[in-house]
Amino acid sequence: MDIYKKLQELQIELPPAPKALASYVPVKVVGNLAYVSGQVPLKDGKFTCVGKVGRDVTIEQAQIAAKLVAVNTLANLHECIGDLNKIKSVVKVLGFVASADGFNSQPDVINAFSQVFVDVFGEAGRHARSAVGTNELPMDISVEIESIFELY
């Protein structure tokens, strides 16, 4: 299966890869693993989802942000490894959700990210995952997700 054809079928268009916002690299390849730094809901240089989920942001808005984070992850992987067909599997996902007091549906938010990878890679997109609530994320963003991919 050609990943780019699958992206086209799913109507997912890769944006230019978002640049690192500080002193780190978006993707680091070590052996056959690609470690993707925490990606954020950034589009056209602007954060699309800020505030606490469950207070300022609805679950649905946070899920849209998580899908954007997935697309940004793919864009950074494409820029780093040159061909998304080199991805053998999604290994691990760690998602953070800036949460209002009492909000405990972090898995529902991060599942939107996970679903993109299952849709794109099929069984190879299924992964180990943690979904964590936190009181703050950088720049008041609502969602940040890091991930690890196995390469051919």
Image (spheres, helix red, strand yellow):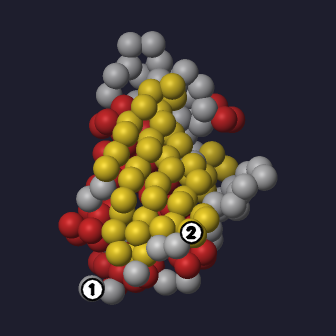
Where, quadrant-wise, is the N terminus in this rendering?
bottom left
Which residue is situated farthest in the top direction here?
101
Q: Choose the circle earlier in sequence order: 1 or 2.
A: 1
Q: Position of residue 5 (x, y in %)?
A: 34, 84
Q: Residues within 10 Å of mark 2 (few under 14, many from 20)?
A: few
Q: Is residue 6 visible?
A: yes
Residue closest to the eye, 134 or 127: 127
User: To which residue does mark 2 refer?
Assistant: 30
Which residue is situated farthest in the left direction here?
123
**Element at badge 2?**
strand
User: Mark 1: which amino acid?
Assistant: Met
User: To which residue does mark 1 refer?
Assistant: 1
Q: Residues within 10 Å of mark 1 (few under 14, many from 20)?
A: few
Where, quadrant-wise, is the C terminus in this rendering?
bottom left
Residue at 69% x, 35% y is 139
Q: Is residue 15 visible?
A: no
Residue at 63% x, 45% y is 47
Based on the displayed image, in which of its 4 quarters is residue 58 positioned?
top left
Horizontally, is 9 left or right of 84 in the view?
left
Based on the displayed image, in which of its 4 quarters is residue 29 positioned?
bottom right
User: Mark 2: which amino acid?
Assistant: Val
Closer mark to the observer between disc 1 and disc 2: 2
Q: Position of residue 140 (x, y in %)?
A: 63, 31
Residue closest to the eye, 131 or 18: 131
Question: What is the spatial separation of the Cα atoms under label 1 and label 2, in whole angstroms?
Answer: 25 Å
